[in-house]
Structure formats: C-alpha cells, structure tokens
Amino acid sequence: MNDPVVAKRPAGSGYTGAERGVAAAPTATEAPIPPTPEAPETETRVHVRPGDRIFRGMATGSGVFIVAIIGAIGLFLILQAIPSLGLDNVNFLTSREWTTTDPSNLRFGILDLLLVTVVVALLALLIAMPISMGIALFLTQYAPRHLSRPFAYVVDLLAAVPSIVFGLWGLFVLGPVLYPFSSWLIDNLGWIPIFAKGNVNVQLGGTVFTAGIVVAVMILPIITAVSREVFERTPTMHIEGAIALGATKWEVVRTTVLPFGKAGYISASMLGLGRALGETIAVAVILSTASSSFGFSLFDGGSTFASKIALAAPEFNDPRSAGAYIAAGLVLFVLTFVVNAMARSIVAGHKEYE
Amino acid sequence: MSTLSADPQRLATPPTFQAVSAARRFKNGLATALVWGAFLVAIIPLVWVLYTVVQRGFPVVLHADWWQKSLSGLLSRQQGGGAYHAIYGTVVQGLVCGVISVPIGIMVAIYLVEYGGRSKLSRATTFMVDILTGVPSIVAALFVYTVWITYFGLGRSALAVSLALVLLMVPVVVRTTEEMLKIVPDELREASYALGIPKWKTIVKIVIPTALSGILTGIMLALARVMGETAPVLVLAAYAPYINFNLFQGPMASLPLLMVNERNNPTQAGFERIWGAAITLVLIITLFNLLATVISRALAPKTK
C-alpha cells in the first residue's frame, strides 16, 4: 500500500526498486521491470506482493473455472444420462422410436433426431455458405470504403434478432409464402426423394425446408463475420501484385483473396454448422411434429435434438424420462463440440490469420 | 478507335496494353453482380422480419397498459392486459446474469492476456472459451437443469435461468474484453511498472480503464444477446401470467416464454400478445445496442 510513496520519489534518487525485493539477490543492479506478459515469470523475482498473488490467483482461478465448466457439462450430462440409458428398451443409437411418457418402459433412440438435425443443418449450410462468402467479399473488396462498416453492421443486426422472433416469422410469414413453391416442387419433382411429399401438411409450412431456410438466415452473420475477418487480412502485396499484372477485380479476388482465406472460410462455415446443429427455438417453433419417421424429404417434419428437448422440457418431472432427453442433449453437445473443435483446429494451423 | 489508314492519329506501334477481353469482362461483371446480390439477399430477411414485427406489434405496444400490466386473470381469448410481468422477467434475468458473468468474464480475459502467456492452462482456457461459445443454449440449459434441479433438488426459478445464461454470456465477455486488453499499448504497462506499481494495480488502474469503453460495449452487446435466449427459460422457468418479483422461487414470465406460450393461441388476443412481445423484445435489445454505442462514444480514451 506504500506504492504511491515510491512513485513520488524523484528520479535519480538512486532508488532502483531492487531493495524492495530481497536485497541480497544477485541481480539487484537490474531495473525492476517485470517480465513482459509473454515471458514466463522467472525466478529472479523472489518477492511477490500479496496483492499480486491474490489477483493472479483470481485470474488463474477464473481460467481454471472455464475449463472445469466444460468438463462439468460433459460429466453431469453423462451421469444423468447413464441410468436412463440402462433402462432403455430399444437401441439408443439405431432406434427411431421416442416414447418416454411411461418411465417404467422407456423406449428412445436418436436416429430420427440425428437425421432431422443433420439435414436441417446441412440445408441451412448449403444456402448460407455461398451467400455469406458473397457478403464477406462484398464487405471487404467491393463495397465502397466508407459504406463497408455500416453495411457490416447491418449484417450483424441479423444476429441481434432473437431466435424466437425468427421462428415465429418463419412459421407465420415465411411458411405461407413458401407454400406455392413447395407444392410446385412436390408436384413436379416429387419423384426425387428429397422433394417427395413428406409426412406433414405442407400447407402449414412446418417442414425441414422452411426450418432450413430460417436457420440459414440465422447462421449468415457468424459465417460472414469470421470470413470477413480472414478476407480482410489478405496481404496488400498480393492484391497489388495481381492488379499490376492486369487482373480484373474478380481475378484479383480469385487469385489472392480466396486462396488466402480458404481455410478461414471453411472454419467459419463449420462454426456456422455448429450453430445450425444447436439452433433450438426457431426450429422448435417451425417444425411440425410428425407421427411417422423421417424419410429424407425436405418436406418432412420431425424434431431435431434441440427442438425435441425444448418442447418436452416443461414436462420434465420424472428423472428417468428427463434422463432420456439429457442423453439426447449429450449427443448434441458432443456433436457441436467436435464440429467446433475441428473449426478451431483448421484456423489454428494458419499463423497468417493471427 | 480509328480504322481509317489515313488517320493521322493512328499509332505507329500497336498499344502495349490490350483491352480486357469480353469473356474476362463478362466474368468480372457477373462476379460483381453476384457479390452485390448476396448482400441484398441477406438484407431481405432482415427487413422482412423487422417489418413483420413492427407492423404487427406496433399497434399493441402503443397502449399504456402493455407496459404497466400483466396478463393476470385474463383468458386466452380476452384482449387487453400487458407484458409488464414478462418485461420484468427478461430484464431482471438478464441483469442477474450480467452481474455474475461480467466479473468472471473479465477475470478470464485478464488471465489470458496478462498472466497466461503461452502456458498449457492458457491454451486450454482459450480453447474452452471457443467451445463454450459454440455450446447450444439448450445444452447449457440442460446442464443447469441436471445440477440445479436434479442434484441440488432446487425448483425451477429465475435464478436458474440466469445461471444458464451465464454460460452463454461469459465467453462473449471474455472474447471482447480480451480483444480490448490486447490493444492496450505495452508502453502504458511498462510506464506503470517503471514507477514501481505492482502488476495487479497496473491492470486495475491503467489497463482496464484504458480498455473500459470497449469492454462495456461488449458487455452491453452480450446482454442484448442473452436476453433474447429462449431455450433456458423454457427448460428452467415455468410461465406465469402474473407478476412475480421473486428471483428464487416460483414461475416467472419472460418475453420469449410469453411468445412460446401464446404461439398456439389462435385468437386475436394471442396474435397481439405474440407480436407485441416480439416488438418489445426487439426494442429492449435495440436499447442495449444503442447504450453500447453511447458508452463506447462517451468513454473512448482520448487519443489526442
């Protein structure tokens, strides 16, 4: 607490600060500049102030806390899921059944949920990937400089709209608008399995098709933001070199920006995939639940992991039934964990993005 | 340009630079059109959603009752009432979440920037923050459900919702704070060390205040984001059409929960409640976004 006094000592009073450490330290002649944050703390500083020790402990503790939380999420979900998995009367991984109303006869399998989740997410990704690449290129290369920031802000606004609002919009506004198009697809291209007449009423719009489009809109901002950041870092030398060789704007982009940003763009898309897999409430609101199982048509209904859990959650009463949903949540957690970890590892290998 | 052989302006040698071929020009034009098109395509849903929300919800929120009353005692087909109970829930759950997440998030960021260096723990923490960013909100909610309700045997409550929101907010706070701390010039830290100020005091008195505007902006944006989350309230709090001030007990409404609840109400009253709540939620989020901008303007470090 006597530091302000120290600070007021006149320069050149001969105080080096070393006396405050252990005076006998052989390095006492050195100025007491602590190591830069990058360098590991060395043993030359013997005396550590209590304030420093406490603060450092708090900071490190918070870091440990974050690591522990992720572990705890996995651990608690596993602990809760195991008893119910033991009581499961059908195969958890390959069954399409989901009956948990009677806790003494649990029959639940995730195959249907997994298929719907993956199809919705992939459809969303398929729509969002080219569009967000376009937006990212637009914002970094094409848009007028002074408009680039406001335009980026507008795209980010999409991320600020709550997912429940997107869900209600998808169900009540977009669904009816898509109906003529959907029924045209079913009538004319119905012989292709993905456009076959599904297991829910298309007129209500609660199909994988609607859900995929809405989720695509919701993952646009994240894919755009990450790709934009990478595209922005294209070395100016590369761009200028291409221009000097007489390349058109598009050729500049194709020969410099895209090759440089490819890994970042793929990683961004995987982050988007992670979001799409876990998207809960918009999908829960939009998708109509179907009585028969998923048949790989875009006009099927059904449930994703997240929507199934969300819709059943208010009725969690028996821990055995709840355990079934927690097991589904665990699968979703693992799925998003793997996708996100892969996305990060792609970028981690590229030092030029730093 | 000139084709006449008698043209006095005709060049003696062919030009060094040739015109860009039609095919290349076409490709370039096509790419430009597609890239502009992509941006416009992204704007359509944004405008469309906002238009829907405003057009359907605006007449509802013009009534003073909307902001002052709850839906207590009203049947699902009875019009009138308000969303005060839900607004209270959304704001309070968000703020409680903020009170818990902000210190944790800032301390994690301080650890990563000031103490962690390239140690194993630091790398693990960075990785886990990234993973936590990607954890679906429903998984966060389920986790709090298993701990809070199954293990501790506590009931569904607003506090449980806040705890689930903490999991979603912390990584956002960490990321923005980290970015801000990183751009604080090292010269400031070194100047402080040179005066013999301990490291922790340097961080608290020099580094944080310099980065404060950015940190607060990030916190506001993170708050705006968690307030729109629906999955945790669905799992962890029951809906109540009346006002409940108690964070620790009993059902408490929130705007997303109100919307989910009224979704299957086919009457005009249900329609009004859904879109009224939607525009209210969007307004609250906009308010926090504006606050973020104001704070970042007002507290930005003086550069000159």
Image: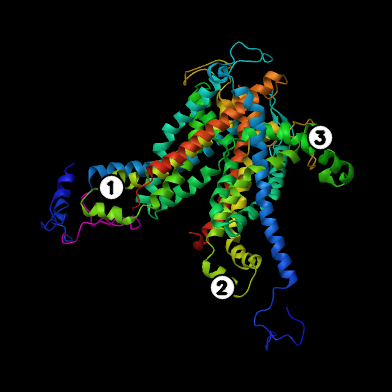
**What percent of the width, then of the height, locates residue A267?**
59, 54
Q: Is residue A60 magenta?
A: no
Q: Which mark is residue A184?
A: none
From the viewer's perspective, tell me whether residue A258 is left or right of residue A23.
right
Residue designated by label 2: A241
Ranked by sequence position, the earlier of labels 3 and 2 is: 3
The region drawn magenta spans: A28-47
Q: Chain of mark 1?
A: B
Q: In the rendered view, would you say A279 is above or below A222? A: above
Residue designated by label 1: B202
Residue designated by label 3: A202
Which is more toward the observer, B96 or B88? Answer: B88
Residue that protrudes farthest toward the top in the picture: B73
Q: Alpha-carbon neighbours of circle 1 within 10 Å: few (<14), some, or many (≥20)?
A: some
* Residue A321 visible in the snapshot: no
Residue type of the residue flagged with mark 2: Gly
Q: Secondary structure at mark 2?
A: helix
Which quadrant does the N terminus of chain B fall into? Answer: bottom right
